Amino acid sequence: MSIDFSALRGVISDLDGVLWRGSEPLPHVPEFFAFLREHNIGYALATNNSMSTVTAYVDKLARAGVPAAREQIITSAVATAEYIVRHYAPGTPVYVVGQAGIREALAERGYPEDPAHAQIVVVGLDLDVTYEKLKRATLCIRAGADFIGTNGDRTFPLPEGLVPGNGSLLAAIQAATDRAPILIGKPEAAMFDIAREALGTQPEQTLGLGDRLDTDILGGQRAGLPTALVLTGITTAEEAKSSPIQATGVFADLAALQEAWSAALRV
């Protein structure tokens, strides 16, 4: 099993664990994306992180040496808001546990926050979560509101190690409500499909790039993409070998991926 680099016309890349860890950039990021531009390979950035706004990601990517337009960035907040647009009428009241990214995405599409009348509870990673927020979400869901999670990542990588992710918040609310959430982000295929629409590529022409087997790689596979795993984030080399989820290619980092891609193009 190997990647047919000559067929690729686009890349859908994860962010955390691939381009940076927390606020610390990972090595060789500007060079890899310069390589893509040099070879006319389009790219989109797809992240399960719902906390930041798209504008904030545009700025952060620019500082990391990766130029990107708003339409190239697909966060789980954006994907969740698109799901809600397709299933609920504009003006449907929501209760949000989350930060600016999901709040902005919902507000832009006409879904007001109204805890007293919420018909949807949307949960994204919230670094300021409190018992009061979890209590309100629980009461809304027990009163009949639908329960949607931007993503189910149980952990989140920071330079000092793995910390609780949105899946940890969802687990607490699920335990309190006996209701499982509808999950939107990776490994669901929707984020990859939205990103491919932005790129204008077919599945076999699009490389799914990430650091997590259970989200990035599994999601790419569900969307029909060849996949590349880099070992700069969550998944270790040992896990990559033993897991039932197998990426099409495994690379130590972006430099190793670029080297393999360049070698394939020279043949």
Image (spheres, rainbow, N blue to C red):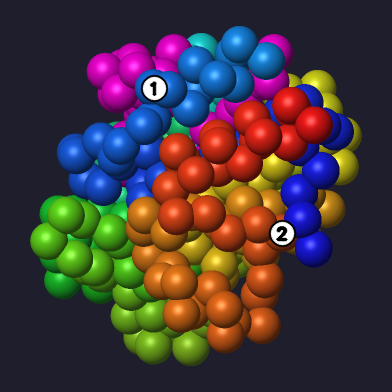
Q: Is residue 57 magenta?
A: yes
Q: Residues within 10 Å of mark 1 (few under 14, many from 20)?
A: some
Task: Decide which of 152, 162 is in the foreground and name it.
Answer: 162
Residue 61 numbered mark, or none: none
Task: Say which element carries label 2.
Answer: loop
Measuring from the top left, give residue 47's x and y in whole percent: 48, 44
Task: Decide which of 42, 194 is in the foreground and name it.
Answer: 42
The answer to whether any part of residue 145 appears in the image is: no
Q: What residue sits 67% from the left and 15% below the top?
A: 39
Q: What residue sits 37% from the left and 38% below the top?
A: 19
Task: Decide which of 114, 163 is in the foreground and name it.
Answer: 163
Q: What residue sits 39% from the left and 30% below the top?
A: 29
Task: Say which element carries label 1.
Answer: helix
Number of marks: 2
Q: Is residue 120 above or below residue 191?
A: below
**Which image quadrant is residue 174 in?**
bottom left
Q: Is residue 95 left or right of residue 111?
A: left
Q: Residues within 10 Å of mark 2 (few under 14, many from 20)?
A: some
Q: What residue sits 69% from the left and 20% below the top?
A: 41
Measuring from the top left, give residue 231's x and y in whole percent: 43, 59
Q: Amino acid at mark 2?
A: Thr
The residue labelled by disc 2 is 248
**Which image quadrant is residue 182 in?**
bottom right
Instruction: Mark 2 and mark 1 in contact? Answer it, CB < 8 Å.
Output: no
The answer to whether any part of residue 224 appears in the image is: yes
Measuring from the top left, give residue 258's x and y in whole percent: 55, 35
The residue labelled by disc 1 is 30
User: What's the CA distance linking mark 2 and mark 1?
Assistant: 24 Å
Q: Is residue 160 magenta?
A: no
Q: Which residues fall within the magenta stretch? A: 40-67
Please report whichever mark, 2 or 1, sits nearer to the chain's N-terminal start.
1
Q: Amino acid at mark 1?
A: Pro
